[in-house]
Image (cartoon, rainbow, N blue to C red):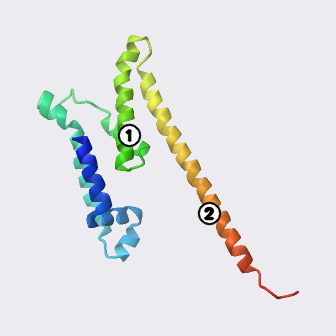
Amino acid sequence: MALAVGVVVALVVNRTRFGFALRASGRSGSAAEASGIPARRMIIQAMLLSGALAGLVGLPQVLGEDYKFGESFTSGLGFSGIAVALLGRNSPFGIGIAALLFAFLDRAGPSLQRQDIPPSVVVITQGVIVLSVVVVNEVARRLLLRAEDRRVARAVKPAAEPQGVSA
């Protein structure tokens, strides 16, 4: 079901007019408004849709195990979802890969406990992975911006010097 939802979300976001309006509103609300896209309405629709998709996480437990939303419901899924989305850089394919990684680490926890390794090692490993990816992405972004600034400065410098004017 998760694979199907991921494919549908990728298609809607990348191939439809609604997806274009959603991306435009998310990147720059004022630019979206200037081009005729109701940015505030799109943001509210995005929040409603993302909440509905996030609600699918608890669906198997509510409909298949307990038949209710109670105290035994798994907690912390929202924070895991945020970490997975951050790790997957908000792309459906990246989120799928990050979700598989986190699922593998979660399922490896009990077998690690049998070997006298504390369960907090899994959480620490997940945190280190997320922080590493965030730091690498930020460093790469800054290096790319610096390289772009240098390229623009080299292109502008010869044009700024007047030709044939002597002092």
Which quadrant of the figure contains the C terminus? bottom right
46 vs 158, nearest the viewer: 158
Q: How crowded is mark 1: few (under 14 residues within 10 Å), some or many (20 or more)?
A: some
- Going by the numbered disc 1, the residue's amino acid type is Ile
Which quadrant of the figure contains the N terminus? top left
Q: How crowded is mark 2: few (under 14 residues within 10 Å), some or many (20 or more)?
A: few
Identify the secondary structure beneath mark 1: helix
Of all residues, the one furthest to the bottom in this rendering is 165
Q: Using the numbered discs, state the Cα–Cα distance from disc 2 to disc 1 in whole angstroms.
A: 30 Å
- Going by the numbered disc 2, the residue's amino acid type is Glu
- Which residue is at a point 11% across and 31% down the rendered structure image? 67
Left or right, 145 with respect to 99, comes to right
- Which residue is at a point 22% across and 48% down the rendered structure image? 52
Left or right, 124 with respect to 5, comes to right
Spot occupied by residue 148 in the image (x, y as percentages of width and height): 62, 63
The correct choice, above or below, for 85 with respect to 101 in the image is below
Spot occupied by residue 125 in the image (x, y as percentages of width and height): 47, 29
- Which residue is at a point 57% across and 50% down the rendered structure image? 140
Image quadrant assignment for residue 157: bottom right
Q: Name the residue under label 1.
A: 97
Image quadrant assignment for residue 44: bottom left
Numbered label attached to residue 148: 2
11 vs 125, nearest the viewer: 11
Identify the secondary structure beneath mark 2: helix
Q: In this orientation, does residue 8 appear? A: yes
Q: Tell me, yes or no, whether the two marked residues, 2 and 1, touch with CB atoms within 8 Å.
A: no
